[in-house]
Image: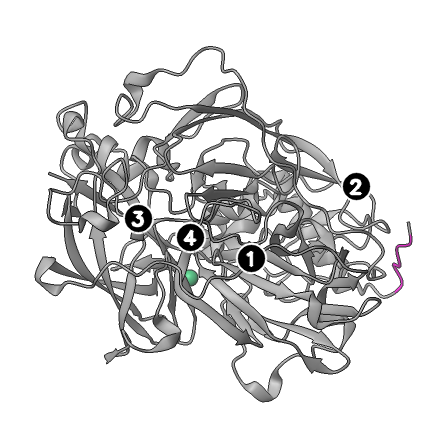
Amino acid sequence: MHITKHHLTRKMLEALRLRTELAKSGVTRRQLLKFGVAGGATLLASTVRLPGMAFGSDLPPSPPTTPWLAPLPIPPVLQTSALNPAPNGSAHQYYTQFPPTQHYLMQAKEGLHTFHPQLPASRIWGFNGTFPGPTVHARYGEPVLLRIVNDLPPPSGPQPFGVPEVITHLHNAHTAPGSDGGPWDWTQRGQYTDHHYLQARAGFTMPPGSIPDEFRDASGGDVRETLTTLFFHYHRPEVTTDGVYKGLVAFWLNFDERDTGNEEDSNPSAWRLPSGPYDIPLLITDKQFDPRTGELFFDMGDREGVLGDKITVNGGIQPFLEVKRRKYRFRMLNGGPARFYTFVLRKGGRSYPFTQLTHSGNFLERPRTNLTRLETQVAERNDIIIDFSQFRSGDKVYLANILPMKDGRQPERDPSKALNPDDVKNQLLEFCVTGDAADPSKIPDEFRPFPPITMSEVVRRRVWRFERGNGIWQINAEGFDHHTDHMAGNLDNPKVQIRRNTAEIWTLENRSGGWEHPVHIHLEEARVIRVNGRDVTNNPAFRQRTDMYRLGRNGRVELFMRFRDFPDPAWYNKGRLGEHTRYVMHCHNMTHEDHSMMVTWNLVP
Ligand SMILES: [Cu+2]
């Protein structure tokens, strides 16, 4: 391995040492926030001399790596398993209506991962010990039981970070709180959590007449609520950044009777999107590496948004992918923790077009064709089609990022400061076009219509202010605290109560100055209807359903939300109400989420 030390200044080495000592000391970020850096020094009991410097700005660069040495890693598809002991059906809402037909087992455990051939293997935590974890292929109409076992060791190694307590959120699944993987009820080492995913579309409990018959599926759900590309990740409060950064993330792909996962499907209703080896998930996430050891390094002193200087694709730094001259579907996921990207496709100093199919797990009404750039914030997914038949065999084509970050809190939006997509530094993935292949795949002219925005369904409006206070990130002047949330009084009488099977207008306001927040609401996706007071329902850029909301600088967005199906009426009086009714909304800049820009809301009768 080739590691250069000569460019490291004393200040940089001190910054590395400080963070390493922090990880070893057991001091949490919350304690650092609460007591400040000086207090942190006291907590460290003088084991480390804390220099009076900002935490976020002075990490040394990662070791240099040569681009395009290794192929793009593609995570395997998870296979079904027998579960022993068998799952307890009485622990899950709607279990008898949607008994699982697919059973999966996954272990959260430590593994060794090579991010680049010139770097040594790093200790990571991953589902089944890999980063990214295996991809789940699921189908509507085939309910899933996923068991996640916590086999994590205590953190060890040169920089021991991470908390081995596991709870896993399937981002935006339409799921009961007990399976949602919200920031509660994590498992200790040796324990497991069973997640029951109905694989039913939202609306299956809506009364007759509320969904037109032509859009009702066999379970009663609304086919216009179909979800496609999802992902699941570690969601332990206060340390979500650490666990996801360490590798606990994977894809979950839903298929259905139109998006069948078979480009040769002879059924006339099948869309025949590129499938099999031509349907590739791309997890894009930035990391930092210790220049002394070449191993994955985590800036645990960061309080604004963790950024790394190496952008990985499926866990590889600047990998290459051999492609044929045909169409490919790429499911792009911005894995955070904080970086925004604007992707472009480059060859020979110019941009080439691609087609967007989905936004954040929802098909668009119709594909967006001839795009030459695509901006994405943390946790968003965008499925795109790249047609490599526009290139010649032997061509090299690059996926590049042109959006710089000012700091962990916000991208730099001045177009004159855009990154150069032809500079190899800003290129993330090399496509090597090598020969022809048959292409039976198609891109339909239209997908499905959206459910209508019906203001007469709205029973209530709520305003949520995203702001900074008491040294932490807050919503409506409060930071999330899982201890408070677990108190009996709060569980019996949840503070925010939303009536099941109604609609509301939610206004999200950014009161935190220039910082941007990628906001996520669990359970239900929505339509953005107004931005900064302006109606955007007919603005092409907002013709999409989403589970991620971009809260720009001092911005205000209004959402039309429907809240459906949960909790199961049979569960209303089972135990404490809050246990069976609660969900969260939070900033998905994971550092903001951890400290503590997250709020609990409940669905009740
Ligand atoms: Cu935020």
Point out the stretch of residues depicted in magenta.
2-6
Work out whether mark 4 precedes mark 2 in sequence or the reverse, and give the earlier one: 2
Is disc 4 placed on a helix, strand or loop? helix
* Quadrant in which residue 508 is drawn: bottom left
Q: What predominant SS class does the magenta segment belong to? A: loop
Furthest residue to the bottom? Answer: 416
Quarter occupied by the C terminus: top left
- Spatial CA distance of label 4 from label 2 is 29 Å
Q: Is label 4 within 8 A of ligand 1 (CB to nearest ligand atom)?
A: yes
Is disc 2 placed on a helix, strand or loop? loop
Amino acid type, mark 4: Glu
Q: Which residue is mark 3?
A: 223
Q: Nearer the viewer, residue 134 or 159?
A: 134
The crowding category of the residue bearing disc 1, from other C-alpha atoms within 10 Å (few below 14, some 14 to 19, many at least 20), is some
Work out whether mark 3 precedes mark 4 in sequence or the reverse, and give the earlier one: 3
Instruction: Please give the count of numbered marks on the rendered protein.
Output: 4
- Spatial CA distance of label 2 from label 1 is 24 Å
Query: Percent position (x, y) of residue 175?
Result: 32, 37
Amino acid type, mark 3: Val
